[in-house]
Amino acid sequence: MDDLIFALDLLTILGTLTSAWLWFAASRRGVRRVSRSEVLDAADINRLVTALNRAQILNRRAALATAATAIFGGARIAAGLLAGG
């Protein structure tokens, strides 16, 4: 049981670090601002859509990593209770 608890602790730590890194990666890329007087062309729209899609993919992965980490944490608590403390 101690090995299971150690593995769940390790998975929780790794999951937390992974989700934090993914959310950081999703937020670090800025998009060039477009002024009100500037005319948008196809390249500008493509750049904006690509940036949004990349951020959405990273956010989805971060949310999945966070959900997995919550499951690992819950399993760790359950394993600790079953082990007697």
Image: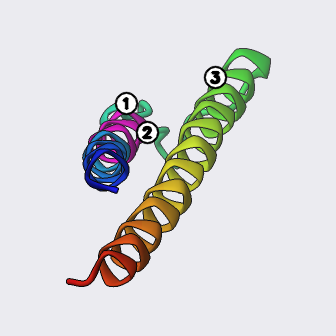
Question: Relative to residue 13, is residue 82 drawn left or right?
Answer: right
Q: Residue at x 46, y 68 (%)?
A: 75
Inspect the magenta stretch and tell me whether residue 5 lies in it: no
On the picture, is 56 further left or further right than 6? right
**x and y, in percent, of residue 14 in the image:** 31, 39
Q: Which residue is mark 2?
A: 26
Check disc 1 and give the amino acid type: Arg
| Secondary element type, mark 3 | helix
Q: Residues within 10 Å of mark 2 (few under 14, many from 20)?
A: many
Specify the quadrant of the image occupied by residue 42: top right
Q: In the structure shown, which secondary structural element does the residue marked by tag 1 occupy? A: loop
In the shown orientation, is residue 71 left or right of residue 16?
right
Q: Quadrant of the N terminus?
A: bottom left
Mark-to-mark CA distance, 2 and 1: 7 Å
Where are the magenta residues, as a range? 17-27
Location of residue 53 (image quadrant) = top right
Comparing marks 3 and 2, which lies closer to the viewer? Answer: 2
User: Amino acid type of disc 3?
Assistant: Arg
The residue indicated by pointer 3 is 47
> Main SS of the magenta segment?
helix
Residue 27, position as x, y percentages in the image: 36, 43
